[in-house]
Image (cartoon, rainbow, N blue to C red):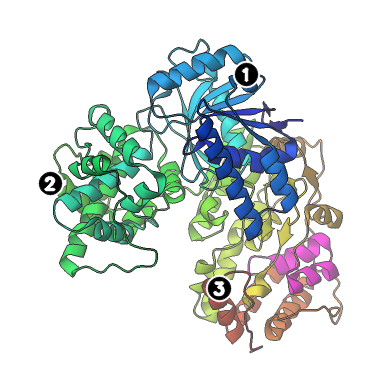
Amino acid sequence: MAFEGKNLVINKIGIIGSGQIGPDIALHFTKVLHTWNVPVVVVDIDSEALARGEAKLEKKVQRGVESGAFKPAQAEAMVAGVVFTKDYAALEGASLILEAASEDAGLKQRIFSQVEEICPADAVFASNSSHLEPEVIFAKIADKSRTLAIHYFFPAERNPLVEIIPGAETDPSLVDRLMSFFESIGKVPIRVASRYGYAVDPIFEGLFQAAALAVEAGLGTTREVDAVACRATGLTVGPFTAANLTGGNPITAHGLSQMTEKLSPWFKVPKLLCRALEDGKPWETPKRGEKIELPEERERKISEMMQGAYFGLVGQIIDSGIVDRSDLEMALELGLDISPPFQLMNEIGVGRALSLVENFAADQPGFSVPKCLIEQAKSARPWSIDWVHRRDIDQVAVVTIRRPKVQNALNADVYEQLKRHFTAIREDEAVQAAVLTSFGIKAFVSGADVNFLAAIKTPEEGFRTSEWSKEVGNLIEDLGKPVICAMGGPAIGGGNELAMCCTARICRKGLRMAVSQPEVNLGFIPGAGATQRLPRWIGLEKAAELLRTARPISSAEAVELGLIRQEVEGDLLDAAVRLAKQAAAGEVVLESIDKSGLETPAKLPDVDIAHFSRSIDAIMCRAILEGCAKTLDEGLRFESEMFAECCKTADMRIGIENFLSNGPRSRAKFTNA
């Protein structure tokens, strides 16, 4: 049995190196691929390293069992799916080889020369390098079209980010296939052009260097600078703490020494780091939960220094042209767990950000002020960040929502970008149909960003917000061209409301939860059309039950009810594009929503609303019964009026505040008022 993705078959994975990161990469692969019976082989010439790696993997799996993340049978299959061995012959037949040895070009070249003799001619050769260019690593490989670097981030089994770095001769179609593969197994891949250090590490290691220079300048101790760096840049883990956790002092020193020549003369190994390497001791850092307070002036100087370095390093990467700006924004937030830089610059002002970089550069010989930041400040406009992306495939516009950090949740920017794209699609005569999809498999759209809803203060604001949130859906529904919604994961709340505006919906097969309208959990009714469209798609009585109880339904039940057209076992996007083309050509007739009024009973059947607010349930019942008796347009406006009624209740505020404070699993204590 093998995993089959977009023109990519994975029947065995080989990982070379059982050191710091190899076992963690193996753990991720076995976690996501054990159900396909794809074996993972970890090879190392050091028996002790193999033993440590195997013990590490088993310990992490056991922790998963204890936390409830893995069931015992699943854990057993995961562990059984990984073999640790000194025998390179065990790699025979592997379709993907991922080397995770030391950051040594000669060593990596020798490893792949050996592997080239063992593995099939179509095996993919990848190096988990953090710095070295693919052209250097694979210099001695005959067929360089199958080679590239794939950079994982600590901890590899949990950190979603991977950088995909093709070399000059890498087959472009291989890059596309691997991007799709990693997305399908829960990672967030970004494409980066070949350059020493790639996109993220010059920022990561540059921030460490800036922190070390702040200590050397006498602005604070490593504990103090570590704490201020977190406050200044939003880092969850400070530079010195991160070095301790990852054992990163040696590789950081090596990387910085090479960047001096390959990137800019500013990069260098700080004296502080040289002493730490000689001493072999961990950095002194804040203890978990410890609050480090500094005098205001010292706090300000360190903060400005760290922000100046951060914004400057990010701008230098953009100036290099090796990565897309939105990709870098997403990568840093996910991979380094740091405030996304362009949003942070927008918050403090782009002009202020430029000033911080200029001040930093004035004190740091060799540090350049990025041209992109200078130009953006001149424009007096904030940075734009693309959360919604469009690409055209055979006269079908594919629109993708990509906010993996929040499972593609909707906010004002996403709505505006969707509106812009679908308006352009409507006017584009070359486009015959469209597909609406999203990034990854965790969720199609996890709903509207609750912070976006929490900002509503009055019933009037609630009405306007509800009306405004319907604009994109109405545009999609009346586009005049077929729009297929391709759901790689659950459509929750506003996500389902958006999906229901499409001409048809298809989803990945076997979703235990495919659709949910959970608004009553938060003390309000849907505001983007669910009270009107769901009854028209699946019938009033069944829709009312789902809306009032927040009961999620599986993909199988959604198909049975007629909400989803089909479950797809293969490539979801291919199926969506194919269906869109067939619908545009008239080869397939897709049922449209009934926009007339429905026959409604005097009263809805009783359902168990559990702990939910009775006052909100009463408003929900009015929205369904009175709204569905009207035309769809009239009913949608009536829903907005009922959403405004929710804004008058104490329970809506209670529900939202409970969610923000305690999370989605906490039951709000509604007062029914």
- Place of residue 161 in the rendered image (x, y in percent of width and height, measured from the top left): 49, 43
- For the question of whether residue 403 can be seen, the reply is no
Dot placed on the residue nearer the N-terminal end, 3 or 1: 1
Q: Residues within 10 Å of mark 3 (few under 14, many from 20)?
A: few
Label 3, label 1: how far apart the Cα atoms are: 52 Å
Label 3, label 2: how far apart the Cα atoms are: 45 Å
Residue 546 sits inside the magenta stretch: yes
Label 3: which residue?
662
Q: Is residue 607 above or below residue 73?
A: below
Q: Quadrant of the C terminus?
A: bottom right
Q: What amino acid type should be assigned to the residue bearing mark 1?
A: Ala
Dot placed on the residue nearer the N-terminal end, 2 or 1: 1
Dot placed on the residue nearer the N-terminal end, 3 or 2: 2
Q: Is residue 22 above or below residue 654?
A: above
Q: Measuring 82% from the left and 61% from the top, which residue is drawn there?
A: 538
Label 1: which residue?
89
Q: What amino acid type should be assigned to the residue bearing mark 3?
A: Asn
Q: Residues within 10 Å of mark 2 (few under 14, many from 20)?
A: few
- Place of residue 120 in the rendered image (x, y in percent of width and height, measured from the top left): 64, 15
Q: Quadrant of the N terminus?
A: top right
Helix, strand or loop under label 3: helix
Chain part drawn in magenta: 527-551
In the rendered view, does 170 fall on the left or right side of 534? left
Helix, strand or loop under label 2: helix
Label 2: which residue?
363
Q: Residues within 10 Å of mark 1 (few under 14, many from 20)?
A: few
Q: Measuring 55% from the left and 70% from the top, which residue is drawn there?
A: 465
